[in-house]
Amino acid sequence: MRASMPGNLRDFAKYVYEVVHHYRRRIRHYEVWNEPHYRGFFRGTPEDYVRLLETAYRAAKSADPNCVIVGGGGISLDALDWAERAFTAGLLRTTFSGSSAALRGLGNSCAATVGRSRSGTPRPPFTPPVSSTL
């Protein structure tokens, strides 16, 4: 079975709230969806992912104002078009706290890709992209 966009974002928000509330004293950082660009992990569009991330951020922050929401993981050579669409849809203007990037296969262009991911005007406070997978 392939992962898909949750059918009901209200239900997803409740789920996120409950998880973050339950672990609020033990876990501070949460990544919203692993490599959403990869169709085996997420069947939605980049625009869907931005809506999902915004929903998760609001729910998580209502459960624990001190939590850190990380999103956007999955920048690789085969995902640059996906990432560009997500940026255009407002990925960096959403309310998430930072981004995670899987930078496998980028070689010498790694720094250029991270620099590209910083384009746009993120809403503060914004944590610079962090590589979660090399």
Image (cartoon, grey):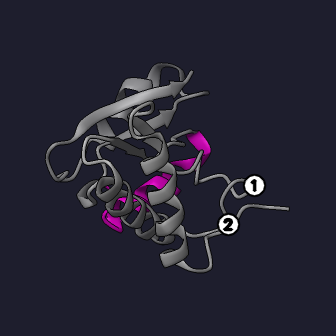
Tell me if 106 is positioned left or right of 3 in this view: left
Rendered location of residue 133, percent (x, y): 56, 25
What residue would you read off at disc 1? 40
Which amino acid is tagged 1? Gly
Q: Quadrant of residue 114?
A: top left
Q: From the viewer's perspective, is 93 left or right of 87?
A: left
Cα gap from disc 1 to disc 2, whole angstroms: 7 Å
- Residue depicted at x 44% and y 48%: 20
- Relative placement, left or right, of 81 versus 122 is right
Q: Residue at x 37, y 25 (%)?
A: 111
The amino acid type, in three-letter code, at marker 2 is Arg
Element assignment for label 2: loop
What's drawn in magenta, residue-wise?
A: 77-91
Residue 56 quadrant: bottom left
Residue 95 to residue 132: above or below: below
User: Which residue: 49% across, 57% down?
Assistant: 18
Q: Quadrant of the N terminus?
A: bottom right
Q: What is the x, y in percent for residue 19?
A: 51, 51
- Residue 21 percent across, percent down from the top left: 42, 50
Which quadrant holds the C terminus?
Answer: top right
Q: Is residue 76 above or below residue 59?
A: above
Q: Is residue 50 above or below residue 78?
A: below
Which mark, by number, is residue 43? 2
As helix, strand or loop, the secondary structure at mark 1 comes to loop
